[in-house]
Amino acid sequence: MAVSAENDLIQRVLDLLGCHDHAAFLRRLAGWHESLGFGSMATRPEKVSRWKRGVRPDRYAEVAMAAMLGVPTEQARTMGWPHWLRAALDDDQVLLTAPWTAAGALAALDHLGRPDAMDRRAALFSGGALAATTLANWAAASPATAVLVSGRPRVTDRTAALIEARLTALRQLDDEIGSAETYALARAERGSITTVLRTRSYSEAVARRLFSAAAEASRICGWCAFDSGDTAVAERHYTGAARAAASAQDPVVTANLFAFWAMARYSDGDTAGALDYVEEALRNARRTGSSRMTAMVHARAARAYAKSGDLRASRRAEDAAYAAYDRAGHPDDEPACVYWVSRAELHSWAASNASDLNDPRRALTRYAAVAAPHQDETYDEDAYPRSRALRLSREADAHLSLRDVDAAVNTADRAVRAMGGVASARGTTVLTDLRTKLRAHQQLPEVREFLDRTV
């Protein structure tokens, strides 16, 4: 017997949501039904069975289902039942079309939490047009409000603070074990926060903190994906983070998100999109009053300009980064997410800019400044093995550009030791590129020995 269109589409939606039975699907739908002000909804499993046989859901259930699946109500009305379900099944439709509201942010977070959501149509999230679209929607986004539902447990400020503390630990854990291991932990953390947002009651202030935490968890996921070499997957996570951050209306998480997203954009060749994100990041960084945050965003701008070959603009942004950092206070007085920003880090970025602008001598001068003692801070390189390995790899490349093969091999050897067990595709790629360049000098014994030892 042929399978009806309703049966096939609804079952595919259940599979997409990870709902293994009708009851699980209806419980999730009932939450949306209630959150939209439609009241309680019966969750007897036979309701879905009737829909599969061709019975159309009532108007309120259908509107709630469209909201849950991130399909605009007008689109669902135009396409008609059950055909509009195809829109929900079109890969990342939720991330691209869900309304910029708290409900839309939750739909995006739910979508990103699905096991198979990361394996689809990367091209949707690799174009420069995404920056303009995101920022246009961002300006019109609606902030989160209180959710007070009778019978639901109440989330307190203490709960929000505990979640924030876990994110602080997760950021620092990434420094220790690398992005590959941290990625799964960050996704699990985001899933937990999403569940709290979906199933608990909370005040408006707590709602903002929870959405801020969800945005930061998704930002960490995006960073991990980017550091693991998958920019398209990073874009998905950053898109979900942007929706959550818009609901949070938190300038700290917003500035941090767009600064990291800018790095993904300029690394993928989209310097214009990167600078659009930098502008939004800088606007929010200034609202935070954080000198470290502002310095970090200016440094991102300098990297984007260097990637585009604009020497003057890159130098101006570098100067702005140093000037902002000169006003920085103790790290404990700054937002927790910029704990890693230091003068040494600014020197390292400036060195990368010089290399991108074909000035290896200036790059080496900046790299030398990284290791120099600074009166205003203590920089512990051992705490950031991935950053150290990347810096040393790029420093070795600068030596090689100046035909100082001995220094290049010596520095490359230190980079390999620094990487240790930290998983980072970026670090591995830089080292691989360096080994390729060194092969041109493999007639030298020290080069051959290094290449043999680092296969």
Image (cartoon, rainbow, N blue to C red):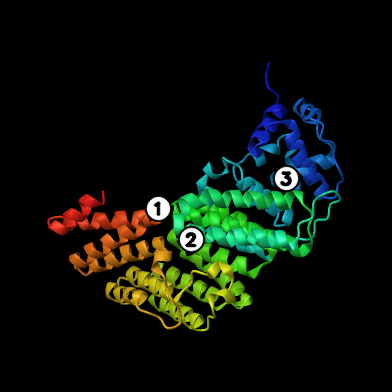
First in sequence, mark 3 or 2: give its number: 3
User: Residue 241: in sight, yes or no?
Assistant: yes
Seen in the picture, residue 231 relative to 60 is either above or below; the reply is below
Task: Confirm or deny contact between disc 2 and disc 1 (CB under 8 A).
Answer: no
Residue 393: x and y, percent?
31, 62
Q: Which residue is mark 2?
A: 265
Q: Residue at x 58, y 49 (%)?
A: 187
Residue 305 in which image quadrant: bottom left
**Residue kind at label 1, given as amino acid type:** Ala
Going 31% across and 75% down the picture, which residue do you hit?
Answer: 368
Furthest toward the top, the residue is 1
* Viewer-side residue, 14 vs 171: 171
Above or below for 104 versus 327: above
Query: Which residue in the structure is indicated by mark 3?
Result: 68
Disc 3 from disc 2: Cα separation: 30 Å
Q: Which residue is identified by label 1?
A: 425
Crowd band around label 1 with a 10 angstrom C-alpha radius: few (<14), some (14–19), many (20+): some
- Residue 100 on image: x %, y %: 70, 57
Point out the frontmost of discs 3 and 2.
3
C-alpha span from label 3 to label 1: 35 Å
Image check: 310 left or right of 129? left
For this rendering, which residue is in front, 191 or 250? 191
Residues at marks 3 and 2 touching, judged by CB atoms closer than 8 Å? no
Q: Which amino acid, mark 2?
A: Arg
The residue type indicated by label 3 comes to Met
Mark 3: few, some, or many residues within 10 Å (few <14, many ≥20)? Answer: many
What secondary structure is marked by label 1? helix
